[in-house]
Image (cartoon, coloured by chain):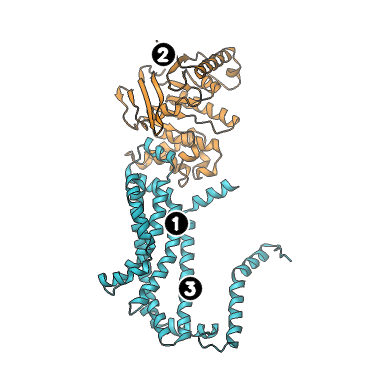
Chain colours: A orange, B cyan
Amino acid sequence: MPDRSPLLRVEHLRKVYATPTGDVEAIGDLSFTMNHGELVCIVGPSGCGKTTLLKCLAGLLRPTSGRMEMDGSPVTGPSPAMAVVFQEYGRSLYPWLTVRGNVELPLRHKKLSRAVRDRIVTDAIEAVGLPEATRSHPWQLSGGMQQRVAIARAIAYQPEVLIMDEPFAAVDAQTRADLEDLVRELHATRGISTVFVTHDIDESVYLGQRVLVLSNSPTRVQEDLVIDLPAERDQLTTRALPRFTHLRTHVYEQIQRAKRGPAVAPS
Amino acid sequence: MTIRPRGPGARTAANFLFAFGLPFLTVVLWGVWSTTSTNRFFVGPLTILDAFRQVWIGPAFVDDVLPSLYRLALGIVASIVLGVAAGVTIGRFHRLRETLEPLLEFFRAIPPPVLIPVAMLLLGITDTMKVVVIVSGAIWPILLNTIEGVRATDSVMVETADSFRISRWERLWLLVLPAASPRIMTGVRQALSVALILMVISEMFASSSGLGYRIAYFQRNYLIAEMWSGILLLGLIGVALAVLFGLAERHLLRWYHGMKEITRA
């Protein structure tokens, strides 16, 4: 049983972009807490600032105001405790490196012996089921396999939190189901805390232990929903459960509400 | 009528014909034409080939060809090193690029041969002067392409490096240079021909050795076949450079060509 102490704490996060035509408030006032070992899905209407939130979490963007804490210490930039899987795998993997070279990339500056590094890389590649592809280049693989390489690279970094930005938005439905199960499996077997951003309601309910429904921009947390589905899930039976249907309908309604009007400030 | 090669042997033969057919035909026509011409400056291919053997295979190779190749190689290497180093620096800093761009456009617009008299005054009639002249022309395509290549580095790739906290040097070797390498190679390809031209011109102006000097010398002394043989040699050097470049490019940009092939399919 993973430790349930708070890992990531976000308080009153606000992000305003200065543009030539005036300021755009991408994130209004966003707070949530995530515990060690949790798998949290963040879902919201398109253009609600999901990617902005994620980039702030990953330390790639500086929030306008608010606090983010990781294990009690403030997040001020990219942290060794976080690894990001981007939506655009084709632009995130380096095409001049092989699969192995890409997975090894984040380990190069960690002071590890050759043997340890090799073991971590091999382990990560095997964990995503690509042991045959190590010597290929990413562009020789299918989209789903490329995203597996990106996931292997992220887990080879051995982060506390895996941050995934709509990672499966660009792959076909069948591949997507396989990748969703991979994320669940990695979460279950390795206990990596995961923040999974998606615009797909079914995906968020299927994957998450908790779903954060975001409002329209300027973004707030519209609802923080615990997904009380059994821990053992699979594509056929879980998705056929009445509770699954109920939850997805609920999230769907919340998102429709979020789209229609400004969010009600959470009390 | 179209020829359809059937087996692999026939295809090789067809490729060979395509590659060497036209050059061969040109030489034959030239040979026939030169026998009917009374112009003493218009020499046949056999005479030139004979002159080529007599002039270039022997001491002239050491006295003229090697110094030329040495200056050319030095000029090309210096252009690549300086062009890429400066290009990476300028390309990475948005402000620096905007500040320098008009100045760079101006310098690039100056035809490099006009710098030869200046370089002669400042550096004398030395090898350094010739290398400087070569670099002054050949560096621009490399520099400007590198700047553009570095500037256009994919933002997601940069964010990936940021998120994994890739250090400055690793970022240079693993991201910035490979990402810019297709553009850098485009620049180098253009620089090679510029370098060859400037090598010859700088030697024609002021030199006591080198291919350019030797060709100008033959021309002034009415050694017409010898002059043509020097031009032939220059052409061969140009072809050799292009072949070497092609090999290097194929090796360095294997990923790039492979990727393009797949996206096209």
Q: CA distance from mark 1 to mark 3?
A: 22 Å
Query: Which of the two labelled residues, at mark 1 and mark 3, occupies the earlier sequence position?
Result: 1
| 10 Å crowding of disc 3: few (<14), some (14-19), many (20+) | few
Q: Is residue B33 visible?
A: yes
- The location of residue A111, given as percent across then percent down, is 31, 39
Q: Are marks 2 and 1 on the same chain?
A: no
x, y percent for residue A60: 37, 33
Please state, as top left, top right, bottom left or bottom right, where the C terminus of chain A lies in the image. top left
Q: Is residue A42 above or below residue A123?
A: above
Q: Is residue A109 left or right of residue B226?
A: left
Provide the residue designation for mark 3.
B235
- Which subunit holds the residue at mark 3? B
According to the picture, the residue beneath numbered tag 1 turns out to be: B185
- Where on the picture, by quarter, is residue A114? top left
Picture disc at residue A265: 2
**Image point (48%, 73%), residue name:** B235
Which chain letter matches label 1? B
Question: Is A207 above or below relative to B223?
Answer: above
| Quarter location, residue B16 | bottom right
Q: Residue furthest right?
A: B1
Indicate the secondary structure of the residue bearing disc 1.
Answer: helix
- Tell us which disc is closer to us: 2 or 3: 2
Question: Which amino acid is tagged 2?
Answer: Ala
Q: Compute the Cα span from label 2 to label 3.
A: 77 Å
Which residue is pictured at 57% across the width and 12% down the height? A246
Which residue is located at x 46 percent, y 69 percent?
B238
- Which of the two marks, 2 or 1, is nearer to us in this view? 2
Given contact means CB atoms under 8 Å apart, are the residues at marks 2 and 3 in contact? Answer: no
Give the residue at the far top of this rendering.
Answer: A267
Amino acid under label 3? Gly
Q: Is residue A261 above or below residue B111?
A: above
Residue at mark 2 shares a chain with residue at mark 3: no
